[in-house]
Amino acid sequence: MLSRLRHWSQHVLAHLPSALPSCCALCGAATGDTICSGCAAQYFSRRRHRCARCAHVLPDVHARACGDCVRQMPAFDATIAATDYAPPADQLALALKFGSRLELAPALARLLRDAALQVQEGPLPTVLTAVPLGSRRLVERGFNQALEIAHPLSRLLGIRLDARLVARRRETDAQALLHPDARHRNMRQAFVVPSAAIDRVRGAHIGVVDDVMTTGATLNEVAATLKRFGAARVTNFVFARTLPN
Protein backbone atom coordinates (compact mmCIF):
# COMPACT_ATOMS: atom_id res chain seq x y z
CA MET A 1 0.00 0.00 0.00
CA LEU A 2 2.77 2.43 0.95
CA SER A 3 4.72 1.70 -2.25
CA ARG A 4 1.57 2.29 -4.38
CA LEU A 5 0.91 5.59 -2.58
CA ARG A 6 4.52 6.70 -3.10
CA HIS A 7 4.30 5.79 -6.79
CA TRP A 8 1.02 7.71 -7.16
CA SER A 9 2.39 10.83 -5.44
CA GLN A 10 5.51 10.79 -7.61
CA HIS A 11 3.31 10.48 -10.70
CA VAL A 12 1.20 13.48 -9.66
CA LEU A 13 4.21 15.62 -8.84
CA ALA A 14 5.84 14.75 -12.14
CA HIS A 15 2.78 16.00 -14.02
CA LEU A 16 2.02 19.10 -11.96
CA PRO A 17 4.01 21.58 -14.11
CA SER A 18 2.10 20.61 -17.24
CA ALA A 19 -1.25 20.06 -15.57
CA LEU A 20 -1.45 23.30 -13.62
CA PRO A 21 -0.98 26.75 -15.18
CA SER A 22 1.75 28.97 -13.78
CA CYS A 23 1.34 32.68 -13.19
CA CYS A 24 3.30 35.51 -14.74
CA ALA A 25 5.81 36.82 -12.19
CA LEU A 26 4.87 40.40 -13.10
CA CYS A 27 1.11 40.57 -13.75
CA GLY A 28 -0.12 37.30 -12.26
CA ALA A 29 -1.88 36.14 -15.42
CA ALA A 30 -2.00 32.45 -16.17
CA THR A 31 0.81 31.58 -18.56
CA GLY A 32 3.01 28.72 -19.59
CA ASP A 33 6.11 30.77 -18.88
CA THR A 34 7.57 32.72 -15.98
CA ILE A 35 6.89 36.03 -17.76
CA CYS A 36 3.82 36.20 -20.01
CA SER A 37 4.13 37.32 -23.63
CA GLY A 38 2.30 40.55 -22.89
CA CYS A 39 4.70 41.62 -20.13
CA ALA A 40 7.69 40.49 -22.17
CA ALA A 41 6.54 42.66 -25.08
CA GLN A 42 5.66 45.64 -22.87
CA TYR A 43 8.71 45.71 -20.64
CA PHE A 44 11.54 43.90 -22.42
CA SER A 45 11.10 44.28 -26.17
CA ARG A 46 12.53 47.80 -26.49
CA ARG A 47 16.30 47.87 -26.85
CA ARG A 48 18.05 50.88 -25.34
CA HIS A 49 21.13 52.44 -26.90
CA ARG A 50 23.86 51.81 -24.35
CA CYS A 51 27.53 52.49 -23.77
CA ALA A 52 29.31 49.49 -25.29
CA ARG A 53 31.66 49.28 -22.31
CA CYS A 54 29.47 49.85 -19.22
CA ALA A 55 25.89 49.60 -20.63
CA HIS A 56 24.75 53.00 -19.37
CA VAL A 57 21.90 54.37 -21.48
CA LEU A 58 23.18 56.93 -24.01
CA PRO A 59 20.98 59.82 -25.20
CA ASP A 60 23.04 60.18 -28.39
CA VAL A 61 22.35 57.20 -30.65
CA HIS A 62 25.62 57.82 -32.50
CA ALA A 63 27.80 57.67 -29.37
CA ARG A 64 29.69 54.49 -28.57
CA ALA A 65 30.81 55.26 -25.02
CA CYS A 66 29.59 57.30 -22.07
CA GLY A 67 31.56 60.18 -20.58
CA ASP A 68 32.61 58.16 -17.52
CA CYS A 69 34.20 55.43 -19.65
CA VAL A 70 35.93 58.01 -21.84
CA ARG A 71 37.39 59.78 -18.80
CA GLN A 72 38.41 56.62 -16.96
CA MET A 73 38.32 53.37 -18.90
CA PRO A 74 37.20 50.45 -16.71
CA ALA A 75 39.05 47.14 -16.58
CA PHE A 76 36.25 45.29 -18.38
CA ASP A 77 35.89 45.56 -22.15
CA ALA A 78 32.12 45.37 -22.65
CA THR A 79 28.84 45.02 -20.77
CA ILE A 80 25.60 43.45 -21.98
CA ALA A 81 22.47 44.32 -20.00
CA ALA A 82 19.02 42.85 -20.52
CA THR A 83 17.13 45.80 -19.07
CA ASP A 84 17.25 48.84 -16.78
CA TYR A 85 17.13 48.45 -13.02
CA ALA A 86 13.71 50.09 -12.79
CA PRO A 87 10.14 48.90 -12.23
CA PRO A 88 9.08 46.23 -12.85
CA ALA A 89 12.40 44.53 -13.73
CA ASP A 90 13.91 45.54 -10.40
CA GLN A 91 11.26 43.47 -8.63
CA LEU A 92 12.38 40.36 -10.51
CA ALA A 93 15.99 40.90 -9.43
CA LEU A 94 14.96 41.56 -5.82
CA ALA A 95 12.66 38.54 -5.69
CA LEU A 96 15.48 36.29 -6.91
CA LYS A 97 18.14 37.75 -4.61
CA PHE A 98 16.24 38.38 -1.40
CA GLY A 99 13.06 36.35 -1.88
CA SER A 100 14.81 33.11 -2.88
CA ARG A 101 12.68 32.91 -6.03
CA LEU A 102 15.18 30.68 -7.81
CA GLU A 103 12.61 29.77 -10.45
CA LEU A 104 13.06 33.28 -11.85
CA ALA A 105 16.71 32.73 -12.77
CA PRO A 106 16.06 30.91 -16.09
CA ALA A 107 13.69 33.69 -17.21
CA LEU A 108 16.29 36.34 -16.40
CA ALA A 109 18.87 34.28 -18.28
CA ARG A 110 16.61 34.08 -21.35
CA LEU A 111 16.19 37.87 -21.40
CA LEU A 112 19.94 38.26 -21.04
CA ARG A 113 20.53 35.75 -23.84
CA ASP A 114 18.23 37.74 -26.13
CA ALA A 115 20.11 40.95 -25.34
CA ALA A 116 23.47 39.29 -25.91
CA LEU A 117 22.50 37.96 -29.33
CA GLN A 118 21.14 41.37 -30.37
CA VAL A 119 23.95 43.66 -29.25
CA GLN A 120 27.09 41.52 -29.30
CA GLU A 121 29.22 42.75 -32.20
CA GLY A 122 32.32 40.59 -31.79
CA PRO A 123 32.72 36.97 -30.75
CA LEU A 124 31.06 35.79 -27.57
CA PRO A 125 33.22 34.78 -24.60
CA THR A 126 34.82 31.36 -24.61
CA VAL A 127 33.93 30.74 -20.96
CA LEU A 128 31.45 32.15 -18.42
CA THR A 129 31.88 32.66 -14.71
CA ALA A 130 29.82 34.41 -12.02
CA VAL A 131 30.69 37.09 -9.49
CA PRO A 132 31.45 35.01 -6.37
CA LEU A 133 29.87 35.61 -2.99
CA GLY A 134 31.84 35.61 0.22
CA SER A 135 31.45 32.47 2.30
CA ARG A 136 29.53 34.30 5.05
CA ARG A 137 26.96 35.77 2.68
CA LEU A 138 26.66 32.49 0.80
CA VAL A 139 25.79 30.71 4.04
CA GLU A 140 23.28 33.42 4.97
CA ARG A 141 21.54 33.45 1.58
CA GLY A 142 21.98 29.80 0.69
CA PHE A 143 22.76 30.48 -2.97
CA ASN A 144 24.62 32.84 -5.31
CA GLN A 145 22.05 34.68 -7.44
CA ALA A 146 24.66 35.45 -10.13
CA LEU A 147 25.53 31.77 -10.43
CA GLU A 148 21.83 30.84 -10.58
CA ILE A 149 21.54 33.06 -13.68
CA ALA A 150 24.85 31.85 -15.11
CA HIS A 151 23.85 28.18 -15.20
CA PRO A 152 20.90 28.57 -17.63
CA LEU A 153 22.69 31.36 -19.53
CA SER A 154 25.58 28.99 -20.16
CA ARG A 155 23.22 26.43 -21.68
CA LEU A 156 21.33 29.03 -23.72
CA LEU A 157 24.49 30.52 -25.24
CA GLY A 158 26.36 27.24 -25.54
CA ILE A 159 29.29 28.63 -23.53
CA ARG A 160 31.05 26.56 -20.89
CA LEU A 161 30.53 27.70 -17.30
CA ASP A 162 33.49 27.67 -14.92
CA ALA A 163 32.39 28.85 -11.48
CA ARG A 164 35.89 28.56 -10.01
CA LEU A 165 37.77 31.05 -12.17
CA VAL A 166 37.71 33.76 -9.51
CA ALA A 167 37.20 33.67 -5.75
CA ARG A 168 36.65 36.14 -2.91
CA ARG A 169 39.84 36.63 -0.94
CA ARG A 170 38.05 38.56 1.84
CA GLU A 171 34.56 39.39 3.02
CA THR A 172 33.26 42.81 1.94
CA ASP A 173 30.47 45.05 3.17
CA ALA A 174 27.18 44.98 1.27
CA GLN A 175 27.62 47.35 -1.67
CA ALA A 176 24.01 48.57 -1.53
CA LEU A 177 24.64 50.13 1.89
CA LEU A 178 27.66 52.17 0.79
CA HIS A 179 28.15 55.55 -0.87
CA PRO A 180 29.36 55.17 -4.50
CA ASP A 181 32.88 56.37 -3.59
CA ALA A 182 33.11 53.85 -0.76
CA ARG A 183 32.07 50.99 -3.03
CA HIS A 184 35.35 51.14 -4.94
CA ARG A 185 37.38 51.05 -1.70
CA ASN A 186 35.22 48.21 -0.42
CA MET A 187 36.01 46.07 -3.48
CA ARG A 188 39.72 46.82 -3.70
CA GLN A 189 41.71 43.55 -3.84
CA ALA A 190 38.61 41.59 -2.88
CA PHE A 191 39.13 38.87 -5.49
CA VAL A 192 41.81 36.45 -6.59
CA VAL A 193 42.24 33.84 -9.30
CA PRO A 194 42.97 30.50 -7.56
CA SER A 195 46.24 28.87 -8.60
CA ALA A 196 44.35 25.93 -10.08
CA ALA A 197 42.48 28.29 -12.45
CA ILE A 198 45.37 30.42 -13.72
CA ASP A 199 45.93 28.34 -16.86
CA ARG A 200 42.20 28.49 -17.64
CA VAL A 201 42.18 32.30 -17.32
CA ARG A 202 45.32 33.09 -19.30
CA GLY A 203 44.48 34.29 -22.81
CA ALA A 204 40.73 33.67 -22.42
CA HIS A 205 37.77 35.88 -23.28
CA ILE A 206 35.75 35.58 -20.07
CA GLY A 207 32.10 36.48 -19.57
CA VAL A 208 31.26 37.54 -16.00
CA VAL A 209 27.62 37.17 -14.94
CA ASP A 210 25.90 39.26 -12.27
CA ASP A 211 22.30 40.15 -11.47
CA VAL A 212 22.55 43.96 -11.17
CA MET A 213 25.23 46.49 -12.10
CA THR A 214 25.10 49.76 -10.15
CA THR A 215 28.39 51.68 -10.05
CA GLY A 216 30.30 48.82 -11.67
CA ALA A 217 32.83 48.68 -8.81
CA THR A 218 32.42 44.96 -8.19
CA LEU A 219 32.58 43.97 -11.85
CA ASN A 220 35.51 46.31 -12.42
CA GLU A 221 37.49 44.67 -9.63
CA VAL A 222 36.64 41.19 -10.94
CA ALA A 223 37.78 42.21 -14.43
CA ALA A 224 40.97 43.84 -13.10
CA THR A 225 41.77 40.64 -11.21
CA LEU A 226 41.19 38.46 -14.28
CA LYS A 227 43.31 40.79 -16.41
CA ARG A 228 46.18 40.67 -13.88
CA PHE A 229 46.17 36.91 -14.27
CA GLY A 230 46.28 37.07 -18.05
CA ALA A 231 42.69 37.22 -19.31
CA ALA A 232 42.60 38.67 -22.82
CA ARG A 233 39.12 40.18 -22.63
CA VAL A 234 36.29 40.47 -20.09
CA THR A 235 32.62 40.97 -21.00
CA ASN A 236 29.99 41.54 -18.32
CA PHE A 237 26.54 39.94 -18.56
CA VAL A 238 24.10 41.65 -16.18
CA PHE A 239 20.36 41.28 -16.02
CA ALA A 240 19.71 44.90 -14.99
CA ARG A 241 21.72 48.13 -15.23
CA THR A 242 20.96 51.10 -13.01
CA LEU A 243 20.05 54.32 -14.78
CA PRO A 244 22.54 57.21 -14.88
CA ASN A 245 22.08 59.87 -12.22
Image (cartoon, grey):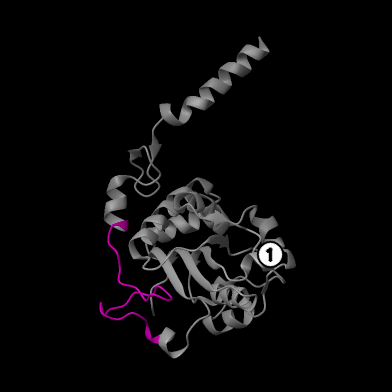
Query: What's the magenta bit mostly, secondary-structure-wise?
Result: loop
Quadrant position of the C terminus in the picture = bottom left
Q: Nearer the viewer, residue 12 or 176?
A: 12
- Measuring from the top left, give residue 200's x and y in whole percent: 64, 64
Q: Is residue 54 magenta?
A: yes
Q: For this view, does 118 lie left or right of residue 69? A: left
Where is 182 relative to 149, above or below? below
Q: Farthest residue to the right: give it.
A: 195
Q: Farthest residue to the bottom: give it.
A: 71
The residue depicted at 27 percent of the width and 78 percent of the height is 59
Tag 1: residue type? Ala
Q: Secondary structure at mark 1?
A: helix
- Measuring from the top left, give residue 33's x and y in whole percent: 38, 41
Where is 42 relative to 65, above or below? above
Q: Farthest residue to the top: give it.
A: 1
Q: Nearer the viewer, residue 28 or 200?
A: 200
Quadrant position of the N terminus in the picture = top right
The residue depicted at 43 percent of the width and 57 percent of the height is 91
Which region shows up in magenta? 44-67
Q: Which residue is mark 1?
A: 197
Q: For this view, does 140 lie left or right of residue 87? A: right
Q: Is residue 80 magenta?
A: no
- Measuring from the top left, give residue 9's x and y in whole percent: 57, 20
